[in-house]
Amino acid sequence: MKGNTMTANAVRIKTANAIRYWILFVFSLFSLTLFSQEQEAGELYAQGEYEKALLIYEDMLTQKPSSPLEYNVANTYFKLGELGKAILHYERALRLDPHNKDAQFNLMFAQQKIVDNIEEKPSFFLVEWAKWVSNLLSENTWTVASVVFFVVFLIVLMLYFFLTPLWGRKLSFHSAWISLLLCIVCTANAATLHNKATKRQQAIIMKGIVNAKSSPDKSGNDLFVLHEGTKVTIHSAVGNWYEITVADYRGWIESNALERI
């Protein structure tokens, strides 16, 4: 019986090792394929074959989305003169990596091409600072940090009740409220990034000229005009109409006139 048990264990170990090797092989093959595709698309882009390069980039994007890949797609659309799609993908690149400097620069350059661009009013500096802090880390990192600070809070809170020296109780008390505050900040930032990623309220106008209506139907009055590439915020939906805002303007446009970031 003992020999049979050892043989069964050896078979299981060999099977597990074989599965790991196959997974590693498939992953390496997949990475190599993506690398060769990226090289091919880069060469086509350098040769001015933008449509062919775009087909490869978009195929790669469906396999493994990333900020650099969104950036390459955006550059290709810009070369093809499709301003709305270029801005859309620059924004998506920044959604995946807010610190992508190349995407930030090219986005600003592309936005200068928008006809009658409606610029958002600068937010209060504390709001801008909060956004900057939120983008310093990813949603997962903020979540892990909030859990760590909460555990620290529980530990030092217990120390506060069990320590006898006054200095120890004071130290644990101040450590507790600081840890709790940091936990709340981390949780708030994680929630902000999660809502931004799931709700996707911001969108880009994809048509050349769009008339924003006073009501969610074509019979509504024309309120203002939006042009391709303009960034708007979606607030509600009625049928195939979206209520949007841009700067101080609010109106209704058809859903096929925009695409969410």
Image: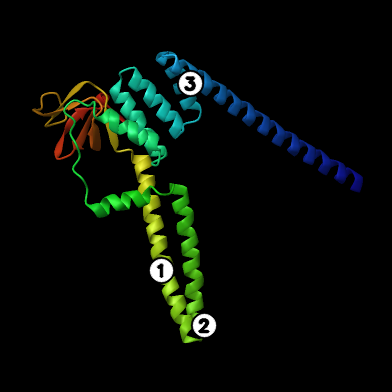
Check disc 1 and give the amino acid type.
Ile
* Disc 2 residue type (three-letter): Leu
The percent position of residue 233, horizontal first and vertical second, equals 24, 37
Q: Are marks 1 and 3 in contact (CB under 8 Å)?
A: no
What is the residue that sits farthest to the bottom in this orientation?
Answer: 165
Mark 1 lies on residue: 178
**Residue 216 position within the rendered picture, expressed as x and y whole percent measured from the top left:** 16, 30
Front position among marks 1 and 3: 3
Residue at position x 44%, y 22% from top? 58
Numbered circle sitting on residue 163: 2
Percent of width and height locating residue 67: 43, 34
Q: Earlier in the sequence, mark 1 or mark 2?
A: 2
- Check the picture and name the quadrant holding the C terminus: top left
Can residue 84 be spotted in the picture? yes
At numbered mark 1, what does the secondary structure look like: helix, strand or loop? helix
Residue in the foreground of this view, choosing between 114 and 188: 114
Nearer to the camera, 74 or 179: 74
Determine whether label 1 and label 2 are within 8 Å by CB. Answer: no
